[in-house]
Image: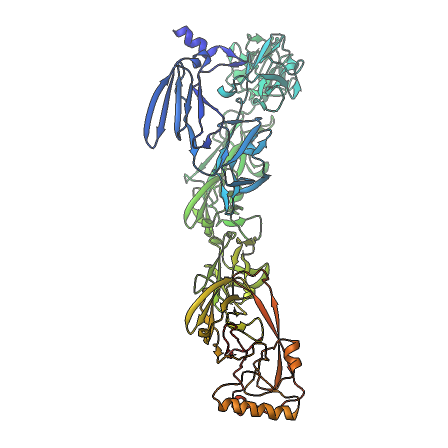
């Protein structure tokens, strides 16, 4: 059993080391979103051949989990929810969520997307949805598919990550949007790692390079190829299917930086490993020890340098120095080649010296060198003391220089950074001292010299650091533009112009710590912020070097927020905008720094601009007219980038005007049974207009019309005398016409005789005798108790040649009606039109005074005859409404 596990872990698969993976679910068809009623096959694949054995399935929906087992590795499903599988021999898979959608438009995408894949996003629609498709990525238009359903990503990469959706249109309705699909492009294989058999091979030995990477289980069948490099130069013949590269022999010149590259066969996906340094080791030769100075007198205190060097030096060679077989404890210092140690001679330094060199392959000794020492003054020792533990400005410090051995008198000299401070002569072995009060300029290296006639001896340098308290720091704010805007990178820089390092800087926003930075060698520190609206406020910084903390002045920063897309709303006193209403246009951007300038537009023509100094939107008022119908939008601008609202359509309704009722007869002589046409028209008002017709306030009927008014027909009887009116209503208030009166006064014996009409009782005459006869006839008729049946004052040619025209005029006029029938097919409703032509008579005669007094009441006279009776009665049509 243990051997089987080891083989699973280490067995090579397709050029990679195999790993135990959990089970994976594949989909057929490959979409995670489908329509309700469709079916999806789940295929469970496990590690190697175990994927075709019994498979356990787990289904979870709304907190409930159901499990089942199948004999094969497939399962057909048609319910939304979370699915997992467990193939025999492999761990449980990751969950896969399927959505069987009831929406009318869906966007389908594959379950997994890898680098280099050719990806199809499919926009599917049900019936009654027009696929004039637009696809969006992260709510930005990506492409217009028109009537195509598929959007292709030919070569997927990390730049294709995002949220996708598509849109279409329902028939005669509105736009619809699909579900949102998130695409996350995955790596097909891991970044390669270069394995080296030896990073420090011995010169001439072989080295094996191995480029290791792992494919994802979904892409386990993808072949890879490999290439190896040294210092950016390709090794061998280039690309190969083998993950290993053999270097038969490594020499010193082969030392360098090595790395490898893995790629798919079409080079669409490549990945580089990190670089590894290989240093070829060379066995050390016998070193050579030299002594310098060679010819100088070796007085006690003389500085002597021992240098040990091999012919083929390696950075990893270890050098050791020996005096009479005893290792020296001095620290060796590497030079360009070899290593050196230096020391001041004492009498104990006489003897034989040699060195050894070891680069890991055995130490090799040098030949011995003999040294004989004489005794001058010894090397002095410089010590520093202070009465205070903390060496700060103002503290008193003492420098003491003393040579442990040397002939008296000894001359001591003190130095600060190679500048002489003073000298003292000592006649005893206790050395000499000098004292002074510290300032900032006293920081640096100090040493002293001792000389008893054989040359000066230098002490080792002693470093003195005078701590200077930090000065008050200066805070500066730097942004990429004159005004800080959300999303900008703000750099805070804090600097104390004076103070000993290291200095710790702290940065604050409204006294809340943002972060800190230590500056070991002094100078300034910086801190960066990606600005949001919450970053407006006061900033400061603090400097502290352990002596005292200093706080900078406060700097105020105002971060401007770009305006969001504004929302335009209409506020009117009723649901339907009507001419004369006061309409308030309100525009508001929910996000953005003040002040905001709002502009209002009608059909892209500016109506006005209003500034909102403290936010909250702005309003613009309009007293509505018919010209105000159309498309409105608004714009918000706070100086960064103007944003335009969505378009809003306004339709202004017009109330109907008072309608005009017109009675129209087919001829001047009207008989019972003739068709009388009533025409009602409101000259102004938004359609659709409903017209109602009334006789003595009793409804005759109604009719709707978009334009041109409405008609109603009556077949005349004697009962139709009386008052007529009509009413127009388009939902904004009904308007009633003036009353038109129809009189039926009697019948005449001759149906073909002339029809007499009178306006305000006046009669037209062509000659004086005719006028007298007409007046006598009219008087006799009235004496008989009836109106004249015909107008004998008209010439026969007037009635025989044309039909009479009706007018409502106070003076004498000849009335000429003109008829046109626009419905000649004889249907139930007959539409006729009367055009009224007024012609002034050249000769007028006196009329009945009763009619002259009613100058504003138009009267239309006509004669109606009943053909079925021997005696006929005359009808007088009177109209109280003016004719157009």
The total number of labels drawn is 0
Q: Quadrant of residue 201?
A: top right
Nearer to the camera, 697 or 5:
697
**Residue in the picture at 39% in, 29% down:** 79
**Horizontal side, residue 711 vs residue 4: left or right:** right
Residue 27 in the image: above or below residue 788: above
Q: Quadrant of residue 102?
A: top left
The residue at the far front in this view is 870
Q: Which quadrant of the figure contains the N terminus? A: top left
Q: Which quadrant holds the C terminus? A: bottom right
State the image coordinates of residue 429 (x, y, percent, origin top left). Answer: 48, 28
Color theme of the render: rainbow
Q: Position of residue 785 (x, y in %)?
A: 47, 88
Q: Nearer the viewer, residue 673 or 764?
A: 673
110 or 367: nearer the viewer: 110
Identify which residue is drawn at 33% across, 25% down: 66
Residue 607's place in the image compared with 851, above or below, is above
Q: Is residue 238 above or below residue 790?
A: above
Residue 374 placement (x, y as % from top left): 57, 18
Residue 522 visible to an observer of this rendering: no
Residue 73 horizontal side relative to residue 314, left or right: left
Residue 395 appears in the rendering: yes
Name the residue nearer the viewer: 656 or 256.
656
- Residue at screen point 41% across, 13% down: 53
Residue 69: % across, % down: 36, 18
Tell which residue pokes out farthest to the left in this image.
64
């Amino acid at each position: 059993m243990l051997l089987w596990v080891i083989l699973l872990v280490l067995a090579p698969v397709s050029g990679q080391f195999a790993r135990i993976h959990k089970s994976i679910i594949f989909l057929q068809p490959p979409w995670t979103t489908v329509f309700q009623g469709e079916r999806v096959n789940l295929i469970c694949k496990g590690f190697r051949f175990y994927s075709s054995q019994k498979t356990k399935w787990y289904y979870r929906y709304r907190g409930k989990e159901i499990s089942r087992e199948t004999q094969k590795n497939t399962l057909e499903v048609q319910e939304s929810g979370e699915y997992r599988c467990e193939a025999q021999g492999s761990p449980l898979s990751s969950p896969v969520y399927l959505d069987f959608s009831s929406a009318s438009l869906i966007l389908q995408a594959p379950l997994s997307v890898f680098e280099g894949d050719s990806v199809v996003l499919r926009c599917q629609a049900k019936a009654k949805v027009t696929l004039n498709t637009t696809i969006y990525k992260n709510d930005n238009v990506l492409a217009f598919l028109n009537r195509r359903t598929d959007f292709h990503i030919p070569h997927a990469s990390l730049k294709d990550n995002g949220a996708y959706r598509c849109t279409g249109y329902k028939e005669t309705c509105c736009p619809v949007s699909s579900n949102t699909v998130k695409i996350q492009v995955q790596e097909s294989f891991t970044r390669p790692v270069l394995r080296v058999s030896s990073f420090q091979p011995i010169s001439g030995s072989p080295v094996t390079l191995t480029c290791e990477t792992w494919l994802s289980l979904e892409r386990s069948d993808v072949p890879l190829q490999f290439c190896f490099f040294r210092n950016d130069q390709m090794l061998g013949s280039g690309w190969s299917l083998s993950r290993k590269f053999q270097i038969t022999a490594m020499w010193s010149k082969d030392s360098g930086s090595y790395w490898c590259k893995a790629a798919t066969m079409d080079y669409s996906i490549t990945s580089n490993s990190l670089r590894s340094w290989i240093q070829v080791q060379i066995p050390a030769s016998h070193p050579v020890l030299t002594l310098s100075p060679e010819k100088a007198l070796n007085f006690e205190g003389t500085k002597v340098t021992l240098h040990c060097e091999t012919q083929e030096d390696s950075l990893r060679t270890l050098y050791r120095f020996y005096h009479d077989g005893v290792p020296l404890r001095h620290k060796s210092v590497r030079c360009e080649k070899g290593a050196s140690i230096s020391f001041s001679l004492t009498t104990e330094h006489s003897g034989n010296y040699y060195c050894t060199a070891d680069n890991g392959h055995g130490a090799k000794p040098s030949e011995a060198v003999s040294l004989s020492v004489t005794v001058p003054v010894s090397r002095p020792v410089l010590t520093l003391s202070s009465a205070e533990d903390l060496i700060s400005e103002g503290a008193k410090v003492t420098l003491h220089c003393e040579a442990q051995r040397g002939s008296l008198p000894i001359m001591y000299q003190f130095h600060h950074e190679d500048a002489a401070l003073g000298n003292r002569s000592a006649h005893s072995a206790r050395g000499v001292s000098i004292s002074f009060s510290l300032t900032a300029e006293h920081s640096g290296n100090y040493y002293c010299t001792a000389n008893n006639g054989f040359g000066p001896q230098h002490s080792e340098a002693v470093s003195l650091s005078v701590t200077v308290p930090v000065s008050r720091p200066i805070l500066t704010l730097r942004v990429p533009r004159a005004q800080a805007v959300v999303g900008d990178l703000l750099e805070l820089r804090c600097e104390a112009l004076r103070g000993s390092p290291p200095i710790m800087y702290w940065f604050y926003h409204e006294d809340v710590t943002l972060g800190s930075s230590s500056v070991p060698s002094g100078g300034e520190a910086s801190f960066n912020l990606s600005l949001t609206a919450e970053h407006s406020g006061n900033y400061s910084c603090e400097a502290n070097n352990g002596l005292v903390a200093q706080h900078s002045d406060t700097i105020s920063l105002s971060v401007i927020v770009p305006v969001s897309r504004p929302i335009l709303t209409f506020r009117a006193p009723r649901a339907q905008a009507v001419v004369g209403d006061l309409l308030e246009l309100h525009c508001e951007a929910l996000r953005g720094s003040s002040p905001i300038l709002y502009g209002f537009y009608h059909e892209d023509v500016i109506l006005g601009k209003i500034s909102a100094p403290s936010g909250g939107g702005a309003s613009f008022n309009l007293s509505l007219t018919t010209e105000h119908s159309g498309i409105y939008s608004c714009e918000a601008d706070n100086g960064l980038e103007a944003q335009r609202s969505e378009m809003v359509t306004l339709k202004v309704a017009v109330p109907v005007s008072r309608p005009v009722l017109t009675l129209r007869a087919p001829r001047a002589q009207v008989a019972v049974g003739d068709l009388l046409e009533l025409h009602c028209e409101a000259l102004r008002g938004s359609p659709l207009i409903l017209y109602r017709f009334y006789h003595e306030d009793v409804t005759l009927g109604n009719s709707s019309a978009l334009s041109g008014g409405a008609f109603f027909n009556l077949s005349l009887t004697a009962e139709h005398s009386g008052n007529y009116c009509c009413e127009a209503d388009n939902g904004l208030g009904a308007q009633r016409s003036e009353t038109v009166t129809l009189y039926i006064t009697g019948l005449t014996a001759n149906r073909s005789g002339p029809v007499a009409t009178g306006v305000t009782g006046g009669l037209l005459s062509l000659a004086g005798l005719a006028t007298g006869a007409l007046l006598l006839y009219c008087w006799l008729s009235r004496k008989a108790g009836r109106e004249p049946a015909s107008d004998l004052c008209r010439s026969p040619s007037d009635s025989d040649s044309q039909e009479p025209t009706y007018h409502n005029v106070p003076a004498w006029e000849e009335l000429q009606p003109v008829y046109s029938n626009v419905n000649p097919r004889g249907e139930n409703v007959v539409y006729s039109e009367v055009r009224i032509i007024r012609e002034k008579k050249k000769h007028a005669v006196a009329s009945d005074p009763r009619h002259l007094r009613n100058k504003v009441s138009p009267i239309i006279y006509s004669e109606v005859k009943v053909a079925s009776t021997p005696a006929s009665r005359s009808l007088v049509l009177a109209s109280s409404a003016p004719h157009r």
